[in-house]
Image: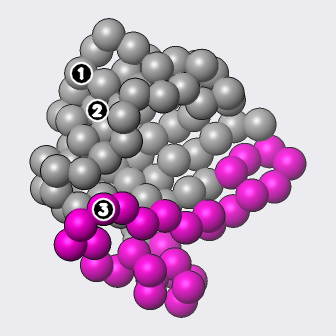
Amino acid sequence: MTTTKASRPWPRATSKSANSQTNSNPESGKQSIVLADDANTKVVLFAFAAGDGLAEHVAPLPAIIQIINGEASLTVGEETVVGKPGTLIQMAAKTPHSIKAQTPVVMSLTLLK
């Protein structure tokens, strides 16, 4: 796992469809929207309510997680980190990982094909 603190957070999505669905965090549960899906990458924007997240799972492809807004506990393999705006985590394919939002969170997931 590679963890990097970016100098500035990734800007919010600019398309109307993405902004309308992720402009505010859900009061409960989670929301997601696919921003791009082509031969090289798939980019998904997620919004989680505080206390929600995803249980441990694996992705079949290498992936990059970026926290855009909020704070979350991220477990990747055996390591747990607190993700804040600008946090980047690069994972190899089939790496077990999970997320639990400590506050409302917006994050991107980029799958590398």
The reply to whether dot 2 and dot 1 touch (C-beta < 8 Å) is yes
At mark 3, the secondary structure is loop
Q: Which secondary structure, mark 1? A: strand
Question: Magenta segment, which residues?
Answer: 13-42
- Name the residue tied to disc 2: 74
Which residue does the image show at 62% across and 66% down from the upper left? 35
- Which residue is pictured at 31% across the width and 38% down the height? 99
Determine the CA span between mark 2 and mark 3: 17 Å
Label 3 sits on residue: 29
Question: What's under tag 3, amino acid-wise?
Answer: Gly
State the CA–CA distance, disc 2 to disc 1.
5 Å
| Circles 1 and 3 in contact, beta carbons < 8 Å | no
Where is residue 8 shown, x and y percent of the image?
Answer: 31, 54
Residue 66 has which mark?
Answer: none
Work out whether mark 2 precedes mark 1 in sequence or the reverse, and give the earlier one: 2
Disc 1 versus disc 3: nearer the observer: 3
Residue 113 falls inside the magenta stretch: no
| Closer to the camera in the image, 40 or 24 | 24
